[in-house]
Structures are given as structure tokens and as C-alpha cells.
Amino acid sequence: MSLLRIRIKLPDRPGSLGTVARTLGAAGADIVQVVVLERAAGRAVDDVTVTWPDGVSLDVLCDALYSVRGVVVDGVWRTTEAPGVFSDVEVVGQMASNPPNGVVALVEAVPKIFGADWAAMLTPDGTVVHASWQAPDPVVPPPLPASSGRAFTGEDGVRYACVPVGGATQTLLLARVAAPPFHRTEIERLIQLATAAEAVLGVSAAA
């Protein structure tokens, strides 16, 4: 079985999510978790994490969802953890218990928290301080946006999120391959986690 995350847009009305859940079950998916990312103007954006049988085409899953009136599939991508399994509080606790290893703990944790493929901590000149074990070798960072705490798409189509850590002495970079962009609520959560890391590690420790 594979663990998948599905981002869908659906009508924000009673019964909509229940219909989606029944449809996913009939298609062979088992829902692990649902995270509501946004509700506005009568529409909702949800990330649904499911287990899916190996060897079964994802087209079966997408076709089933598209059969539900009003549902739009923004993306389907593989993940290793359901959101919330590895919590922000747990990461902060790890950093606090071992500050010299805090940056490593943070970088290794954020792909699990945000359903990313890999993460890296960078200096302003692009030097890699630490990259998660899933990261490509070598890590070739994309040009980073001037504004802090934002999502962007690289020229190769990879979805990125970045946030300054340690008084902008470093940048935490997350990457998703073959996935939808990072949602603004995810960016807000990433900023909160970076702020907590700064408080625990201190600017000098993160530098």
C-alpha cells in the first residue's frame, strides 16, 4: 500500500466531504486524515491523506473524484507521513533538548510535517548547511525570492517553500516534486515553526 496526499477543491456544504469519502472508499482508498486548508466563498480546499493499493493506477482515483459533482483535483502526490503524525511541538522539543543538533532536527522533520520530498538549510550565498536525507546530491538551490516566507515554483516545475531562520542568517527550503504549490496556510505554519526554532536555538545557534 502507498500513502498518498490528495488536494481537492469542493463545495463547502454539508455532505460534500462525506460524498468524497464514500467515493474514495468505493475506489479502493482508505482515508487516513483530512486537513482543511481553506474555506471561502462557498468552497473548501482540503488535503486528504489516503492509503492506496500498489500497482493500481492513480487514474482510477482521480476519475472517481471527478465523478463527484463540484470536486476539482488540484494534485495527487506520494508522501511518507500523514499530517500531524510528526508534530511541530515534537520538533521544537527535539531542538530544545539538543540545541547543537537543532538545525539537523528541524531540516529532517519538515518534509514529514509538510508532505515535502526534501528540505535544506541554506546560507545567504546558497551554501547548504544541512540537507535532509531525501535531498538530491548535490543540492542545487533555485534562485530564492527576495520576500521571505513564501511559496514559488522553480523553472523545472518543482514546488518550493522558503522561510528565513535565525534573523535571516539562513533560509529553510522545502521542495515538492509532481505536487501542487504549497498553500498559504502551510506557509503560515512554516513561518510559525521557524519563529519557534529561532526562539529555541537563538540567532547565533542558527547561524
Image (spheres, grey):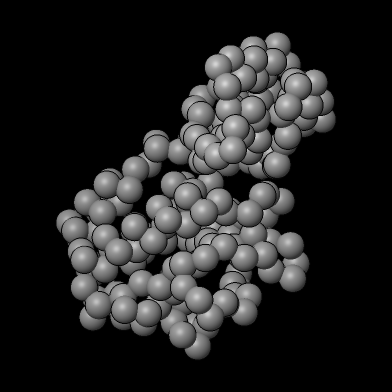
Between 59 and 57, the one lying in front of the other is 59
Query: Which of 43/186 is in front?
Result: 43
Q: Nearer the viewer, residue 137 or 32?
A: 32
Relative to residue 148, is residue 42 drawn left or right? Answer: right
Q: Tell whether 86 sits left or right of 67.
A: left
Q: Residue at x 42, y 56 (%)?
A: 188
Give the percent coordinates (x, y) of residue 88: 33, 48
Asked if residue 5 shows in the view, the reply is no
Q: Residue at x 52, y 54 (%)?
A: 184
In the image, 134 versus 62, the foreground residue is 62
Q: Quadrant of the N terminus?
A: top right
x then y, percent, for residue 168: 37, 79
Picture coordinates of residue 139, whole percent (x, y) = 59, 72
The image shows residue 24, relative to residue 179, as above or below, that is above
**In the image, residue 195 above or below residue 40:** below
Residue 72 visible? The answer is yes
Give the quarter of the figure containing the C terminus.
Answer: bottom left
